[in-house]
Amino acid sequence: MLGKPKIRKPGDLPAHRLNGRTGCSAAGWMRNPLVRSRGLLSCPNVWKQQDKIMSVTLHVCITCKAGETVPEGTACPGTRLHAALMAAGAPETVQIVPVECLSACSQGCSVALSSPGRWSYVYGRMTESDAAEILSGAAAYANTPDGIVPWRERPTIFRKQSLARIPPMVLA
Ligand code: FES
């Protein structure tokens, strides 16, 4: 029986991964400069060590006004989103870092997910009420070797409100 044709969604392209496999024996790991420089090749559980090193950063713009007029002395929407994320608590491998402007000022509140060796993503039109979904998306991102979370496992806000994806930096 023929399966459904694979439909690519925005943000999925290209679908290929940097490494063919994620196991210890995968040739991709041998070529990974980070693994080589840290001497992890002798470890029987390279994946766990790699995961520790490659913690994920969730940058949150704390200067986003999201089109609101913000009276002096009150927190702007970006600051409130950051506070909501901090209050909810980040997953173990995710670090929440405030930043002033992600250059997506016309797109409401913005956040960015990044990690060495993984694709980076910028999301817009976020609100405080999205905090739980943002953190669950960040956790799913942290559980991938390359940052590409399968489409159906992404939170809806990540599926619909992605502004940019940036390839992982390749070290020479
Ligand atoms: S002020 Fe938030 S992206 Fe520019």
Image (cartoon, rainbow, N blue to C red):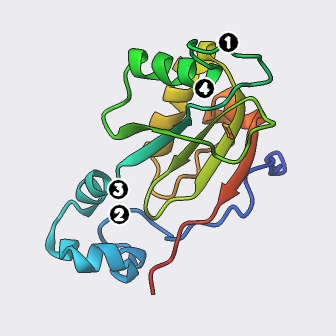
Q: Residue furthest front?
A: 72
The residue at the point 57 percent across, 58 percent down is 119
Give neighbour class at mark 1: few <14, some 14-19, many 20+ (Cα, 10 Å). few
For the residues carrying marks 1 and 3, which lies nearer the camera in this image?
1
Query: Which residue in the protein does label 2 denote?
Result: 23
**Is tag 3's residue or tag 2's residue first in the polypeptide sequence?**
2
Q: Amino acid at mark 2?
A: Gly
For the residues carrying marks 4 and 2, which lies nearer the camera in this image?
4
Q: Secondary structure at mark 4?
A: helix
Q: Whole-Å distance between the Cαs marked 1 and 3? A: 39 Å
The label shown at residue 78 is: 4
Q: Whole-Å distance between the Cαs marked 1 and 4? A: 14 Å
The residue at the point 69 percent across, 16 percent down is 70
Q: Does the closest atom of ligand 1 sit within 8 Å of the Cβ of label 4?
A: yes
Q: Amino acid at mark 1?
A: Pro
Q: Amino acid at mark 3?
A: Met
From the top left corner, tell me how far across and down residue 42 is, in percent. Answer: 15, 74
Q: Quadrant of residue 154?
A: top right
From the top left corner, tell me how far across and down residue 134 is, in percent. Answer: 56, 28
**Is tag 4's residue or tag 2's residue first in the polypeptide sequence?**
2
The label shown at residue 139 is: none
Q: Is residue 113 above or below residue 69?
A: below
Q: Whole-Å distance between the Cαs marked 1 and 2? A: 53 Å
From the top left corner, tell me how far across and down residue 169 is, in percent. Answer: 52, 71
The label shown at residue 71 is: 1
